[in-house]
């Protein structure tokens, strides 16, 4: 049942990603280089809505919140590496995954090396090196703060640090994000797909469904992720079973493929310059190692961890953005300004 629920979650996530053209790499890069906040607002609105939704679900007892550990060294180093990698790869973890379903051959290469080096970082030749780069990991006992958290130790959040009801920082955080989303001017774009706010709302519903199904039928209470899914898919070649997150990744590819075919956007795409394959391969390597060192990718930390107000996810996200901006400026900044 867990595999089926993961596949269903991923299927709908893939449709939303493809029809919304939602890629975190593009959202960050466009904001920095072109002052275009169209996709950025989709991300920010989704996080605001998820913050409220996750805390509501936990209050109702449908899920328990499981914020990621705080690894200051790993969050910083891994965040930068992942930020560099997604620019080189031409897409974030979810971006290269859903674009693989559209027929983009560079996304295939990026995704293959992303998954390969993420797996090598967990169980292969890079395991010791990645563990060393991660540095210490910190967890806290959160049950004394609220029964909304998973029992036992979890990663520290704003609520556990200040020892307050999780709803207090959650509502303040969501309100600030909503003020930005609806109180500032939004860049305009055309296109046949979902607009930015529809994309954000649909992503939130998919994340809610994923959180509940993963905890109820899968391996743990947590919502969407990509890196662990690619690791799980690779592990099946060694005889291990497909799990919720691995099925989710397969569902994303299938959903994006069907959405692309239905909208007549599926096409085998190859770059004009074959050297691009080398660039995206390097990007995939950086992403795989970076996500492992940071303890998560843009979906595990940015989209899923930030709504928990997890300190580790907030720090990793900051360095995803910094890494993305530095690499984007190095590759494209002079051309844009010129």
Image (spheres, rainbow, N blue to C red):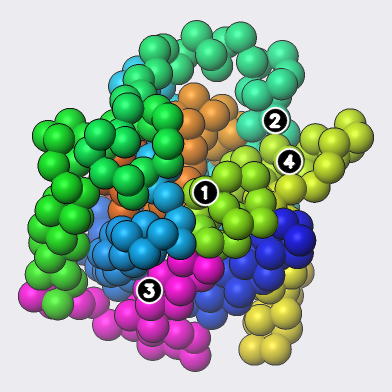
Q: Residues within 10 Å of mark 4 (few under 14, many from 20)?
A: many
Tell me residue 76's x, y (percent): 33, 26
Which image quadrant for residue 33? Answer: bottom left
Q: Mark 3 points at which residue?
A: 200
Q: Mark 1 points at which residue?
A: 221
Reply above or below: 163 against 203. Answer: above
Question: Which quarter of the rendering shows the C terminus?
Answer: bottom left
Disc 2 + disc 4, Cβ < 8 Å: no
* Contact, mark 4 vs mark 1 (Cβ under 8 Å): no
Where is mark 4, residue-wise?
232
Task: Identify the residue at horizontal 25%, vertical 54% (top origin).
Answer: 32
> Residue 119 has which mark?
2
Q: Do the residues labelled 2 and 3 touch (CB within 8 Å)?
A: no
Give x and y (percent) for residue 267: 73, 75
Which region shows up in magenta?
Answer: 183-209
Against 251, residue 277 (above or below) is above
Q: Which is more N-terminal, label 1 or label 4?
A: 1
Residue at position x 48%, y 42% from top? Answer: 297
**N-terminal-most mark, 2 or 3:** 2
Q: Which of 223 and 99 is in front in this view?
A: 223
Q: Nearer the viewer, residue 200 or 51?
A: 51
Total numbered circles: 4
Q: Which of marks 2 and 4 is nearer the N terminus?
A: 2
Q: Which quarter of the figure is the N terminus placed in?
A: bottom right
Choose mark 4 or mark 1, whichever is in front.
1
* Residue 183, visible in the rendered structure: yes
Element type where label 2 sits in the image: helix
- The local secondary structure at tag 3 comes to helix
On the picture, is 268 further left or further right than 221?
Answer: right
Kindly report the distance in space between the C-alpha atoms of the residues bearing marks 4 and 1: 17 Å
Mark closest to the chain's N terminus, 1 or 3: 3
């Amino acid at each position: 049942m867990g595999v089926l629920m993961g596949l269903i979650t991923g299927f709908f996530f893939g449709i939303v990603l493809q029809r919304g053209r939602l890629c975190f790499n593009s959202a960050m890069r466009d904001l920095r280089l072109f002052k275009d906040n169209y996709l950025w607002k989709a991300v920010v609105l989704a996080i605001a809505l998820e913050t409220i939704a996750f805390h509501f679900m936990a209050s109702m007892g449908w899920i328990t919140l499981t914020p990621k550990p705080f690894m200051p060294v790993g969050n910083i180093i891994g965040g930068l590496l992942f930020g560099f990698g997604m620019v080189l790869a031409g897409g974030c973890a979810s971006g290269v995954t859903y674009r693989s379903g559209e027929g983009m051959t560079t996304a295939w290469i990026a995704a293959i090396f992303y998954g390969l080096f993420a797996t090598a970082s967990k169980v292969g030749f890079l395991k010791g090196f990645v563990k060393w780069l991660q540095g210490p990991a910190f967890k806290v006992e959160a049950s004394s703060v609220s029964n909304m958290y998973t029992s036992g130790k979890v990663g520290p959040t704003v609520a556990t640090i200040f020892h307050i009801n999780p709803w207090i920082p959650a509502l303040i955080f969501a309100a600030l994000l909503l003020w930005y989303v609806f109180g500032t001017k939004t860049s305009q774009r055309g296109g046949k797909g979902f607009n930015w706010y529809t994309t954000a709302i649909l992503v939130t519903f998919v994340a809610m469904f994923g959180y509940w199904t993963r905890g109820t039928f899968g391996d743990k209470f947590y919502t969407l992720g990509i890196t662990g899914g690619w690791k799980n898919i690779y592990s099946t070649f060694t005889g291990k079973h497909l799990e919720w997150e691995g099925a989710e990744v397969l569902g994303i590819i299938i959903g994006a493929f069907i959405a692309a075919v239905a909208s007549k956007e599926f096409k085998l795409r190859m770059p004009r310059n074959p050297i691009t394959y080398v660039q995206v391969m390097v990007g995939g390597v950086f992403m795989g190692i970076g996500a492992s060192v940071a303890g998560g990718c843009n979906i595990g930390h940015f989209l899923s961890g930030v709504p928990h107000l997890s300190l580790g996810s907030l720090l990793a996200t900051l360095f995803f953005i910094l890494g993305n901006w530095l690499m984007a400026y190095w590759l494209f900044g002079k051309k844009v300004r010129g």
